Amino acid sequence: MQQHLRHPVFSVISRLAGEQNVQAYAIGGFVRDIFLNRPSKDIDIVIIGNGIAFAEVVANTLRVKLAVYKNFGTASLKYRDLEIEFVGARKESYRRDSRKPIVENGTLEDDQKRRDFTINALAISLHPDTFGELLDPFNGIADLQNKLIRTPLNPNETFSDDPLRMMRAIRFATQLNFRIDDIAVEAIKTTADRISIISQERITDELNKIILSPVPSIGFNYLFDTGLLHKIFPQMVALYGVDYVDGKGHKDNFYHTLQVLDNICETTDDLWLRWAAILHDIAKPATKRFEPSHGWTFHGHEDRGARMVPKIFTQLKLPLNEKMKQVQKLVQLHLRPIVLSQSIVTDSAVRRLLFEAGDDIEALMLLCKADITTKNEYKVKKYRNNFELVQQKLRDVEERDSIRNWQPPVTGNDIMTIFGIKEGREVGIIKNQIREAILEGEIPNNREAALTFTISKGIEIGLKVVTTPN
């Protein structure tokens, strides 16, 4: 293990531990990541005794600032490329109605017992007499080798004490592509109701980490199968299942959504584009109808889904800013490129899509490609070829007409000046006519053509030209 402790800070901590006659251990994620061959810049140090007092000695020796958090009994410092947190070893007990523990001083064994998972309970001694010695009381190394998420103690107690650990178990399984121990899975099912004592912000933070994982469907399947998803995101659960009438069914929109999410993760790390994948069909349960002549339909699910986005973001404590608006726009427009790809693409339709999507057009096309989940290779190839044609048409029209993030070449102020009128209904009518004429290709997207068009339309509705602007 000593080869992984070559950073100068470890020799300093080791020397000071010897001089102070203090037992010090690196513990948790840093140790776990050594065996996963993952770089780690965050190091947790457990001290048998007063962690803050020892941290002060280390900070003075290294001549760096120390941040002390007395309420939590921790202290942290930054040294070169590392962030190091010190805490005294402790044991914890919990009240039924809170995830905040009652903390007492404890031994290393007590501290390892309170850890969430065996793979996070690994410790390495930093005392000079035992420097580099690994302490693995719960067979965390074996669990790393077997790709298994398991709790040090009874999982029912572990998850009941701190229900956020249920989300963390699923998050680690998703990030690492590990399996959760069967006993722990059953404990999550039994304890799922306890998630209600966790703040929505903490739940959503874990959910976002699952979504940002390489294959998020791993986590969502665990969330669904254990019943946690039913507690934290019931709108997504409503996508599950297939109805049949006269032998006609529809695809399971829950598993379709997971496939779209996994697909889009192959092309983007953007959290909000991944959220758009999750929410693109969220209104299908509310719009599902059976029509004898057509089978199952979901007419208007894109419009209703877009209207659902702000409510869901509010519920999950996601930001109600431009990120939410981007997701809303992508949900609203996600069918448009698909429609274009299935018919002869007109310049007018392409201009309208560019006008409405703006700078999100590339994200929209990524979402639409990810939405192809058919197992029919012929259809996949056909859809992808059609999307390539649509994208080329988008590039051609944009280069020629500059519609993306369109600004009208004639403004409302121009119209008021030309006809000597105040702001009102006539101004709005003419502005809309200018926009429609440009989008339909009746006039080019430039000021000279738009001014000529403006004057003619004003005269048509009885206005008189009082001046002609440049």
Image (tube, rainbow, N blue to C red):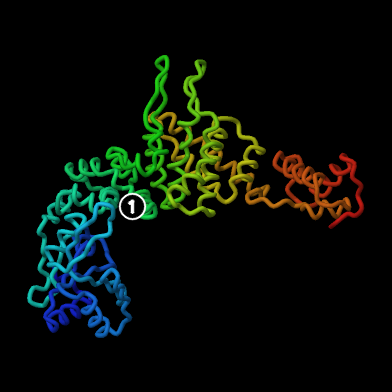
Q: State the residue at coordinates (63%, 49%).
A: 404
Instruction: Answer yes or no: is residue 194 visible.
Output: yes
Q: Which residue is mark 1?
A: 198
- Above or below, 465 relative to 42: above
- Tell me: 268 left or right of 35: right
Crowding near the residue tagged with mark 1, few <14, some 14–19, many ≥20 C-alpha atoms within 10 Å: some
Q: Nearer the viewer, residue 67 or 462?
A: 67
Above or below, comparing residue 73 to residue 264 in the picture: below
Judge by depth and name the residue closer to the eye, 457 or 69.
69
Question: Left or right: where does residue 69 sit relative to residue 180?
Answer: right
Place residue 354 in its image quadrant. Answer: top right
Q: Residue 131: where, in percent of width, then height? A: 11, 73
User: Residue 4, percent across and down?
Assistant: 18, 69
Tell which of 281 and 232 is nearer to you.
232
Q: Nearer the viewer, residue 6 or 83?
A: 83
- Residue 6 image point, x, y percent: 19, 74
Quadrant where the image shows the C terminus: bottom right
**Residue 219, located in which quarter of the rendered image?**
top left
Residue at the image position 57 percent from the left and 51 percent from the top: 359
Helix, strand or loop at label 1? It is: loop
Q: Residue furthest left?
A: 129
- Whole-percent x and y of residue 169? 25, 50
**Residue kind at label 1, given as amino acid type:** Ile
Residue at (10, 77) in percent of width and height: 128
